Amino acid sequence: MAKPIIGITLDYEDDQKYSAFPYYALRENYITSTRNHGGTPILLPFELSEAEAYAELIDGLIITGGNFDISPTLYGEGEMHSETKLKENRTKFEWKICQSIIAKKKPILGICGGMQLLNVILGGDLIQHIPDSIENALEHETKPYDQPGHTINIKEDSLLFKLAERKKVVGVNSSHHQAAGKVGKDIIVSGTSSDGVIEAIEHKDYPFMLGVQWHPEYQISDLDQNIFKEFINASK
């Protein structure tokens, strides 16, 4: 059997740190984690006119995290927090390809900002800046990222519970200042941190749709390994 083709979205920078011209960027561990669990990774530039063709080509989609936020206008908020940073071309592309993938019922794994995008697409909203909205919030920007930053509590009888091998508490890394607020239609909250921040969502009827707020591509736990393994198996 041919290996499933896994499309992975990119981040985009024009900060001139690497090049005087705008460039795409992606950490290698998204690619190696996909490859190591049996997928063929391909990277998806922000070509709106190609989104439908990409969705036809790939067997599963990973929406990655990055140095950006989703515009609050997309979830009905007119005011933008001072810490919110937009990459509107990226969001337009990811929104379009996600809609195409959802229409085709192909597997989706949303990581960090990717989880937030899934929630908004399905009718939810976001907390724009956790420290301003959550009393006694944990530190959700913790380094190093290859070590757990805090634990999450996992809902029993969820996909995440299965992938955690029936563990109710697991350590995860953390790198975000926003989070899902109200969840979208048919979304189950399957993981939360001790301060109440939503750490994982899944769709109750979709064949495989999982969003996680942490970065499982670092593969720091059995749960992280199992997330990629199950996603790629679902893409076959």
Image (cartoon, rainbow, N blue to C red):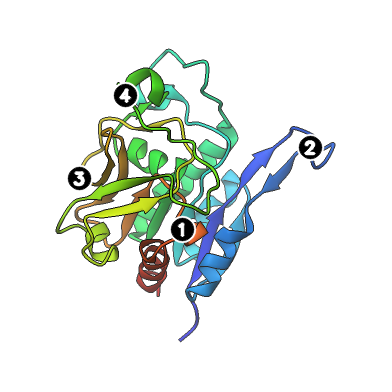
Q: Quadrant of residue 72?
A: top left
Give the SS element for disc 2.
loop
Taking the image as shown, residue 176 lies to the left or right of residue 179, namely right
State the separation of the CA atoms marked 2 and 4.
36 Å
Quadrant of image for the N terminus: bottom left
Q: Quadrant of residue 118?
A: top left
Give the SS element for disc 3.
loop
Amino acid under label 4?
Answer: Asn
Q: Are marks 3 and 4 in contact (CB under 8 Å)?
A: no
State the separation of the CA atoms marked 3 and 4.
29 Å
Identify the residue under disc 1. 61
Quadrant of image for the C terminus: bottom left
State the separation of the CA atoms marked 1 and 3.
20 Å
Q: Which mark identifies residue 136?
A: 4
Name the N-terminal-most of marks 2 and 1: 2
Q: Which mark identifies residue 17?
A: 2
Amino acid under label 2?
Answer: Lys
Identify the residue under disc 3. 186
> Residue drawn at (27%, 62%), measured in percent from left and top?
207
Image spot of residue 234 (x, y percent): 35, 70
